[in-house]
Image: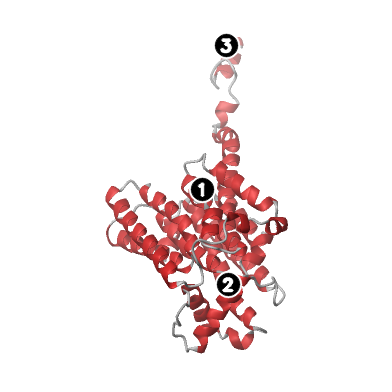
Amino acid sequence: MWIVLHPRAAPTTRAGPCAGALWWAVLAAGVALTVALRALRSPGAPAPVEAEAALVGQVLAVVGLGGAAAPGVSPAALQVAAWTVATGAWDRAPSVLDAAREAMLPVAAVTALLVWVLARRLDVERPWAAAALLLLAVCPPLLDAQRTVVAAGLALPWLLGALALAAGPRRRGRRGLVRDGGLVGCVAVGVLTAPVALTLVPSVLWFAVRRRDPVDAAVVGSALALVAGAGTAWTAVAGTGTRLAGPGAGDLLAADRLGVDPLGPLLGAAVALLALGSARTRPLAVGVLPAPFVAAITATPWPGLVALAAPLVVLLAAVLVGRVVGTAARPVRRLRTLPRRHLHAPAGGRAGARPAAATARR
């Protein structure tokens, strides 16, 4: 975790201590706003979906058995049960559903934090990273999707952690081993939590290959392939709440679901396609584009797809907009950095030509 969150692990610009403290405050405020907007939702809202009801039933089974894993209980249910038991949510929440949904609040907080970290790893300037954090906090589809207890929403922080580690600076020795072990571990937990997380495994591998260390890339790639294959096989055989060969893309993208947010899927696809044109964002876009099809195969519910893909689309949009604005503002920055003597010099000569000519006329 130190490798991910330490300030020196992300590209930074020279700034004074006051500016650094200001951006830390902005980050804390963005994470707090994200949690507050989801915590203030009325009890029972949004209406539970079938997958959420099944997952909450598994959580109840785990809690009723004293924390032991019952047959057919998914890793997602174990994570929710661990949070609710540790925080006493069952005694505090007005209903069983609201108690389980309290576990999604730290998930939303960690997601917002890792979106900031990954944006900085992609060389996004702090103002645009803050804009992405704000949009992530107030995005209407995410207000409901990140409150719904679905496996895909629980898996996203694990994959974001893996992406942040893979996109980080090249490290050798013990720190490199810790980073690679954390990367593979995050991918393993994410894939076991929700097989739809497989859509982001190529992105993690691509970022790892970009380190230009063939041995490291080969080791990480082999470990990721083994983890992805084993996780998919275990999920398919165990039947832990997320089945393969789901209802298909036609059911996932049904008209009633698109009617809630008709522009969301189109904007997300457009942003991902535009991100393919940039070498900086291409690895992440490759993981976002097939997300609807992987979600259809794994029978991921609509809130799960939104919770998984929307934060990544917001991040891609921040990178693209920041790059466009930065390119447009580059000539203005160059003019500001020119010495004043060049700005006041006459067109036909150097700055000292005019005083010399005046002296000769005298």
Real-space Cα distance between discs 1 and 2?
25 Å
Q: Earlier in the sequence, mark 3 or mark 1?
A: 1
**SS for callout 1:** helix
Would you name the residue on which mark 2 appears? 104
Q: Residues within 10 Å of mark 2 (few under 14, many from 20)?
A: many
Q: CA distance from mark 3 to mark 2?
A: 81 Å
**Circle 1 residue:** 285
Amino acid type shown at disc 3: Ala
Q: Position of residue 23 (x, y in %)?
A: 56, 58
Tell whether 270 sits left or right of 9.
right
Instruction: Indicate the quadrant containing the C terminus: top left, top right, bottom left or bottom right.
Output: top right
Residue drawn at 52 percent across, 39 percent down: 277
Residue 2 in sight in this render: no
Residue 73, given in percent of the width and then of the height, sits at: 48, 77
Residue receiving disc 3 = 360
Q: How many residues crowd around disc 3 within 10 Å: few (fewer than 14), some, or many (20 or more)?
A: few
Query: Which secondary structure lies at badge 2?
Result: helix
Label 3 element class: helix
Characterize the local packing of mark 1: few (<14), some (14-19) or many (20 or more) Cα atoms within 10 angstroms: many
**Can you tell which quarter of the image residue 144 is in?**
bottom right
Cα distance in 3D space between marks 3 and 1: 67 Å
Q: Quadrant of residue 300?
A: bottom right
- Specify the amino acid type for callout 1: Ala
Q: Residue at x 36, y 48 (%)?
A: 209
* Residue at 44%, 67% in the rendered image: 236
